[in-house]
Structures are given as C-alpha cells and as structure tokens.
Amino acid sequence: MKNLFLLLFCYCTGITHAQGNRFIYEYEYVPDMGTQNPVKKELMALDINANGSSFRSLNAIKTDSLTYAVMMPSSGNLSLNPNSPAMQNLSSMKKNNLISYRITKSYPSYDIYFYDMVDMDLYKVKENEDMKWHISSEKQKIGEYNTQKATTDFGGRSWTAWFTQDIPIQDGPYKFHGLPGLIVKIEDASKTHMMTLIAQHHKDKEDLEDIKSKGFRLYRSEIAVDKNQFRKIWKDYIANPSKSIGDSQTKMINNGKEVTDTQEMKRSIERQVREKEKKNSNKIEPDLYK
C-alpha cells in the first residue's frame, strides 16, 4: 500500500507540472434499441489535472471551439450570420451530436457534477448516489494494461469495469471512480454501453471550459439543480420543447436559417427535439431521465 501511495504521489506530481493528461476512450453504444444498425462509436476525452477531471465528447469539444471561432472572430464582435457557410456547417454538426453532456470530478473530494443543456440553459446536477464496487480477483490483459475486474450498480444499470493499478488514479469515464486505479474498460450488462481506453497524451491546448473563464458561453444561464429537479425539467421540456419561445414576430435562427414565423418555428423545434430524443432513448444513465 505504501508503494501505491508513493506511485500515486509521483504520478499526480507529473500531472501538476504539465497542463494535464488526456485519456481517450472509444465509446460504443446503442442509442436506440429499435434500429437495424444500432451501434455508434464516439471518442470521449477524460482530461485530468491536479485539481480534478472533465469527461466529454471530443466532437462536442471541437464543435464548441469552432463555434467560438465563428461567433467571436478576431474583431472581437459577436457574429450570428445564419447564412454563412461556417454557421450552416456548425448547425449540421450540432444536430448530429447525440452526446452533449459533460462530467466533472474534483480532487480529492470527488464531488461530481453532470452538465447538460435543456433548451437554452445549462444545468449543473450534483451526483449524490454512492458508487459501491465489488472487486473480484479476476484479472485480464487489455491492450498494454494489466487489469482487474470490479462490478457495481449505478444509474439504473449493472456495470463491469476493468481497472489498472499501472495508472494509480481513482478515476474513469463518465461518473465512474473510486477503484484503486484508472478504469480501462467498462460495460453495462445489456452490452449496449461500453467504454475502452485507447490512447493517452499530454493536454496542451485549452478547450471551451478554459475559454469560458474569458467570458464566452454558449448558453443562456447556468442553473444548479438536484437530480429530482432535473428530472422534472427534462420531462417538462420533452412535453413542450418550444415553451420558451414567445409569440412575437421576431427574427430567430433555426438550422442556420432566419425564421420569422413563430408558430412554424415552434413546430419545427418540437419535431427536431422529439426525433432526436427517439434516436437517443437508450440513455447511459436511465435513472436520471425517468
């Protein structure tokens, strides 16, 4: 145990002197159980520094960075030209992005927050469910890592994880943490959600989370809620996705186009939200949306 603590200290010291480490996971998942070719793949980034970690889709990170570049050009003036090729391209990218959430964990307390957009607001949801692991003696070589098996029930699913003490960080993809080493692979019992570590490197560039500190944001407001509050907000939004749009005949942007017909705008938003929700009904944490 003394050697493990010494190794952990050395590893975290290395992270402190760098900007951080980025661990890339391949996320294979089935967003909609009713589709004929259901499996999708997404690259996810677990960014770790001395203060904590952040877990998010690489595609979402790229999209937000491009949005910042398009909306805040070198002049420093906000640009929202819906007819520009850049805005139309961004609109298409956002429409196809099913994974919009971000997870943060703070060290050493491991306070966990789930961030996701509902309508135009960003909701910050504190995790309050304990992660109770059952560690097995079973071991397996996954890629270059020597791993050990552990199981838990979380978020409405049963999970099997494989962690490695080769990287003595008690973290992992999504909200998973608390094992004596980094989680290399984790899969739910239905085999419709699986995340596997495929690469790691030093993180040198700032992402939108860093840019936000400069005063730029892609949402109306950030609202802290508990899980029960978030469930109600989500249900209300799915029942009426266009509720926040008034009846005034003002110009709005939808899919990169200016729209002046408010009622048509509402109908379009309702169609888009419900189609997207149908395509993403098999959520990684079903208890959060029940």
Image (cartoon, grey):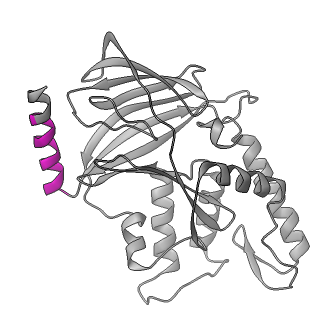
Please state, as top left, top right, bottom left or bottom right, where the C terminus lies in the image: top right
Left or right: residue 79 versus residue 142 is right
What residue do we see at 84% from left, 81% from top?
260
Q: Is residue 136 left or right of residue 244?
A: left
Magenta-span inclusion, residue 10: yes
Q: Nearer the viewer, residue 48 or 9?
A: 9
* Front residue of this view, candidates 54 and 156: 156
Residue 22: x and y, percent?
30, 47
Vertical placement of residue 232 versus 153, above or below: below
Q: In which quarter of the image is residue 246?
A: bottom right
**Residue shown at the point (59%, 53%) measured from the top left:** 226
Residue 254: give x, y in percent of width and height.
74, 70
Range drawn in magenta: 6-18
**Residue at the outermost top position:** 138
Please identify the quarter of the rendering in which residue 224 is found: bottom right
Q: Quadrant of the N terminus?
A: top left
Does 220 sit left or right of 64 as displayed?
Answer: right
Residue 38 in the magenta stretch? The answer is: no
Q: Is 126 situated above or below 153?
A: below
Q: In this view, does 52 lie above or below 163?
A: below
Residue 51, picture quadrant: bottom left
* Nearest to the observer: residue 205 or residue 9: 9
Towards the viewer: 141 or 232: 232
Return the x and y of residue 223 as percentages of the image width and height: 58, 66
Q: Where is residue 11 in the image (x, y as percent from the top left)?
A: 15, 42
Name the residue: 64% across, 37% down. 287
Q: Is residue 210 left or right of residue 271?
A: left
Q: Main secondary structure of the magenta part?
A: helix
Q: How many marks?
A: 0
